[in-house]
Amino acid sequence: MNAVLYWTSTIAKSAYILVFPLTLAFFLAWAERKQSAVMQDRIGANRAKFLGRPFLGLVHMVCDAVKMFVKEDFVPDSGHRVLHTLAPFLAMFFALITFAVIPFGYQLTIAGETIGLQVADLNVGILFIFAMASLGVYGMVLAGWSSNNNYALLGGIRASAQMISYEICIGMTIIGAILALGTLSMQDLVIRQGYHYFGWLPRWGVLLQPLGFLLFFIAGIAETKRVPFDMPEGESEIIGFNLEYSSMKFAMFLFTDFIETVLIAAVTVTLFFGGWQIPWLFESGFVWPWGGGWEIHPNVVNILRMAAFAAKVTFFCWLMMAIRWTLPRFRYDQLMDLGWKWLLPLSLANIVVTALVVLLVN
Amino acid sequence: MAVQNIIKVAARRREATLGFWERVYIFEVVRGLWITTEHFVGNLYYHILKLFGIIKVHPLTPTIQYPEEQRTLAPRLRTLHRLVRREDGSPRCVACMMCETVCPALCIKIVAAEGDKPQIEKRPKSFDIDMGRCIFCGYCVEACPEDAIRMDTGILDIAAYSREGMVLDIDTLLSLQPAQRRTDKEVDELQRRLLQ
Ligand code: SF4
Ligand code: SF4
């Protein structure tokens, strides 16, 4: 592959995978208001207007951004200035960097060269995700510690306890998926979900690992630190690690939650819902299970697949938002019970059963 | 000890009332999601219809878009006060201080002056109501022997940029009109009929 194509494609891919979660997170911040309103028989934000129209409440998001930028950026006198500033950047960085290994499509053929639609095709991609997600907790802990505020510190400790408890479960369920599909590379994981049972039922991870999907999704929601698992923040009453934050730094923590929502949705889709796969769509076009087909140019196929990936991620973001606005918050002991007494043993059992089945089938 | 027993009993009772499948919770979550999703889809359908102008009013949301839409007020609702005028235009108030005395929020301040007609002994020189303190109890209206103060303007959005701005003086109070299109005479007539 020539250097020009290599660099332009890499930059384009990086830009895409950076803009995609950020855009989705922006719309999630909007959906937080509007979707909750629609679910609760309200109307939702519609007062801020541009040219006399509320644009479905999107103008509010612009106003919010302006507000966040012009607010006072406060650092407590007795806090640690450097770490206090670093913490939100860490949280956001580790959430965003994880997208590097998410395959958002298969490949495109440009000027005779194939370009894999994934920024970094690591052969241990799934472990990279796990590692980065674990590092993300440092943002919360540092935020709690550097504020020199007891409540913030307690929030940080709650965050780290929760994250560690649920990361174990995430790791275990991922192992189940890896065993079932037999690879660690994200792209291969998706490719191996492209087969069909009986010629029509797509072999998505959720069929191989129904329990694994459920456990991963629950633990994933806990990782995003949003209701019903929002103990670290508890913005309505118990006060969390971001207590001493204001202005854009506060917004970055807020935004990190949304980016993590997109991330969990993307990983769920990649592991359990066939990533960019569309049922019955192969490299040369659709092949209907009842015979016949529909020939499509391979590049068009792959653009369709990118769209499918985006649509699936959007759906899961919607689902997580619906869960967030349906359930009340867990109590802290319930949270720990759920993590250690239910999810962990179940995910261990899941691994054992999966391993046995894989052994017997092979 | 006693407290712990109570907690234990409460926990046991709660567990007794929840069935196994409810305690597993997952299915209850799905049921809850089903309900909220039903609302979401139903509301979204009408929101889209409204967006394209097919319907004017969303039938499922009870929201009143406040400054543009106002809810209809009950005729007896206590709203901003006004002072009633006589037929010759002078205030009915005879500065008897009944309302000032009865007001539990101490927000009425009246300065009395000599009446300008022989049959009117006193008149209010100034009559201030501090709306920042008023609790809308309506006692002033009840207390007035002359039916000179009424709370029927239908005005609820009372706001000002300062505390002083919340104090309404006699000219403002006299200039306010009743919300219903009834003249003071008709109201008097109505009240007389009701009292009989
Ligand atoms: S309504 Fe009650 S509080 Fe208000 S001025 Fe009359 S008596 Fe005072
Ligand atoms: S009770 Fe009536 S007449 Fe007496 S001072 Fe108050 S408003 Fe005037």
Image (cartoon, rainbow, N blue to C red):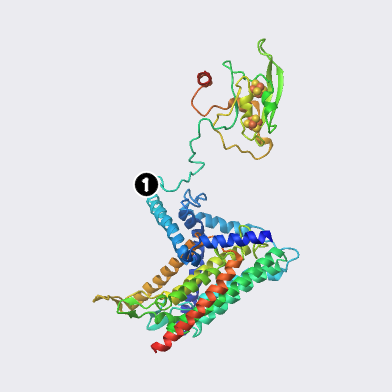
Specify the subunit that label 1 lies on: B
- Compare residues A131 and A283 and report the one nearer the observer: A131
Quarter of the C terminus of chain A within the rendering: bottom left
> Residue A318: x, y in percent?
46, 63
Asked whether, in this view, residue A306 is left or right of residue A144, the answer is left
Write down the quadrant of residue A169 in the picture: bottom right
Asked whether, in this view, residue A245 is left or right of residue A324, the answer is right
Crowd class of label 1 (few under 14; some 14 to 19; many from 20; radius 10 Å) = few
Asked whether, in this view, residue A55 is left or right of residue B93, the answer is left
> Residue A130: x, y in percent?
54, 78
> Residue A71: x, y in percent?
64, 57
Quarter of the N terminus of chain A within the rendering: bottom left
User: Image quadrant of ligand 1?
Assistant: top right
- Compare residues A118 and A70 and report the one nearer the observer: A118
Note whether A86 is above or below B122 in the view shown.
below
Amino acid at pointer 1: Ile
Name the residue beneath numbered marker 1: B55
Residue lying farthest right? A78
> Residue B193: x, y in percent?
50, 19
Residue visible at 48% across and 48% down in the picture = A52
